[in-house]
Amino acid sequence: MPLLRRLNALLDRFLMAAMAAAFLGLIGTVFMQVLARNVLKMGMIWTLDVAQLFFGWCIFVGAALAVRRSAHYFVELFPDDWVRLNAGLKLLSDFVIGVIVTILLIGGWDFTVLGLARHTEAIGVTEAYWVACVPFGAAAMALFLAENVVDDLRRFADTFRQD
Amino acid sequence: MDPLVLLMGSFFVLIALRIEIAFALAAASLITMIYIDLPVASLVNQMYAAINSFPLMAVPFFMFLGRLLNDGGITTKLLDVADATVGHVRGGLGHVNVFVSMIFASLSGSASADTASVGSILIPAMKQAGYGAAYSVAITAASSTLGVIIPPSIIMIIYGAFGEVSIGALFFGGVVPGVLIGVGMMVYTYILAIRHGYPANPRRSLRQMALAVWHGAPPLLIPVLVLGGVTGGLFTPTEAAIIAVIYAMFLAFAVYRIVSIRRLPAMLAETVIGFAAPLFVVAAAGIFGWLISYLGAADRVSAFITGVTTDPLGIQLMLVAFLLIVGTFLNPISAVLIFLPIIQALGDLSGADPVMLGVVVVMTLAVGLITPPYGICLLIAAQIGGVSLGRAFIAVIPLVLIVVAIIVAALLVPDIVLFLPKIMLPNVFPGSG
């Protein structure tokens, strides 16, 4: 477990830096597009493809980072002081996330392999680079989820010890 | 079992069991797809296709803009402008609260960013000046809902991108209702101020007022850039957002210099997490929305509604009532994405203009930001003000009624919404002039 925690901390740091760079890339690409059209009076169609590349990676990897921080939206129906029920529901949530992550990992991999044979219109690069964000993000989610599950199991067990 | 009932039922059960909304959407879709024998692989395709959208890129840009405004010290400048202009009216800090939210709304598209930034400064100041704690919390939370009504608005971007409605027209459509709600809240504040003896801030001299406006003027150029660029056909809303971001970065890092450029990587990464969560909901809602359409939900809801009433206003009021309930437990982005096919079917059925419908939907869902259990703005403000959620909710009810009154007024007189977009973007309304 300490190894997983250390690995995830490292991965988190790397992904945060990569996402900062990707988001800056997204800002720069769209800004270049505006400049090209309005100032240089020329079209830069490739910027659309590149912007979508950064955008997709930001969303799927950002969603993985949000799993680690429990930053995804949820509806709280039960009061905070129903500790055991909430801890149990958190475990159920981990299970559902696990199922979806598995689908994204397997389906995303197949989707990426299919993308190898297709090429983007503007820059002619294989589409796999674009859709690979799905299995990559899912793999990161799986690692972060494993850490959450251990913590949530401990929290759930603690509610019995408190009795 | 009816697959549509399975889809909706499993989604509601899952979110009631505290499953994250994005994963609940995907899981409910997965269960239904297995049940009706659809290939599970299309879940991934549809999720990716949902975020493969250029208009949607405006969302992260406007979120980053909100972050720059907060961290770059721009909010403080705006507060000074608001204080200089309306602070001297009876109940001054309440008016400043509403007015600064209106300005903030015109710069960023996020309500919760407004609550956190304005609330952390104004709620303690209002309590110290003798304003009721519950009222201070309520006015802060309620006025920040203007963030999603007055343009630019993240929810309008999502509504426009997925509903194929002009985002520019939605932006302009939000201006008049947003201003009316703001004015309504200021009138309410004035009445309360007289009843409870709330003070007014000292009136500033003309020179002091001019100085405050002068210092606050640079960020006020942002709405001019965004709306002016869109109206003039220079930029799409996404491109206008990027221009606003570049300008706000220049202000934050080069002009005001309250935040160091060394903070930029952290600000960028934190914004990615901030927008990835709602946009992952967008991705998951892609497959859910597709299934809703595939299973013919819109037709069935339309048939049900027409069984109750065929009066256009009646249909629209039923839609508003439904969305008010939905908004209490779902955030507006999820609600728009999940129910868009049904919303638009009912809009068509009642002959509502798509722009008017979009603005009314956004205003209605904005109410959910201040009503429990979701009520994120009320939660943030109550936490800052140290007020129980129950007391805050009672105090916010009159302000909710103001918003609802403007929604009903917009349904009765659609030109409240359509007047401005028809002037600014006439090509969106062919045959209306």
Image (cartoon, rainbow, N blue to C red):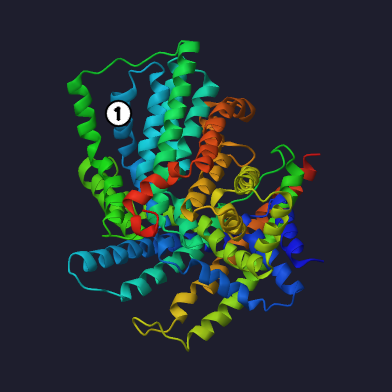
Callout 1: chain: B
Q: Quarter of the image holding residue A25? A: bottom left
Q: Quarter of the image holding residue A153? A: bottom right
The residue wearing badge 1 is B80
User: In what quadrant of the picture does the N terminus of chain B appear?
Assistant: bottom right
The image shows residue A116, relative to residue B387, as above or below, that is below
- Tell me the residue at 49%/72% (across/down): A133
- Tell me the residue at 62%/61% (across/down): A145
- Tell me the residue at 48%/23% (across/down): B188
Look at the numbered disc 1 and give the secondary structure of its residue.
Answer: helix
Q: Is residue B164 visible?
A: yes
Q: Is residue B169 left or right of residue A100?
A: left
Q: Is residue B211 left or right of residue B81?
A: left
Q: Is residue B54 left or right of residue A98?
A: left
The image shows residue B342, relative to residue B322, as above or below, that is below
Return the residue nearer the eye: B212 or B384: B212
Q: Within 10 angstroms of label 1, few (less than 14), some, or many (20 or more) residues?
A: some
The image shows residue B107, relative to residue B271, as above or below, that is above
Q: Quarter of the image holding residue B38? A: bottom right
The residue positioned farthest toward the bottom in the image shown: A117
Return the residue nearer the eye: B104 or A69: B104
Q: How many marks?
A: 1
- The image shows residue B189 at horizontal and vertical percentages of 46, 21
Q: Amino acid at mark 1?
A: Asp
- The image shows residue B68 at horizontal and vertical percentages of 34, 46
Q: Is residue B262 visible?
A: no
- The image shows residue B324 at horizontal and vertical percentages of 62, 42
Return the residue nearer the eye: B429 or B3: B429
- Tell me the residue at 56%/32% (across/down): B400
- The image shows residue B415 at horizontal and vertical percentages of 44, 44
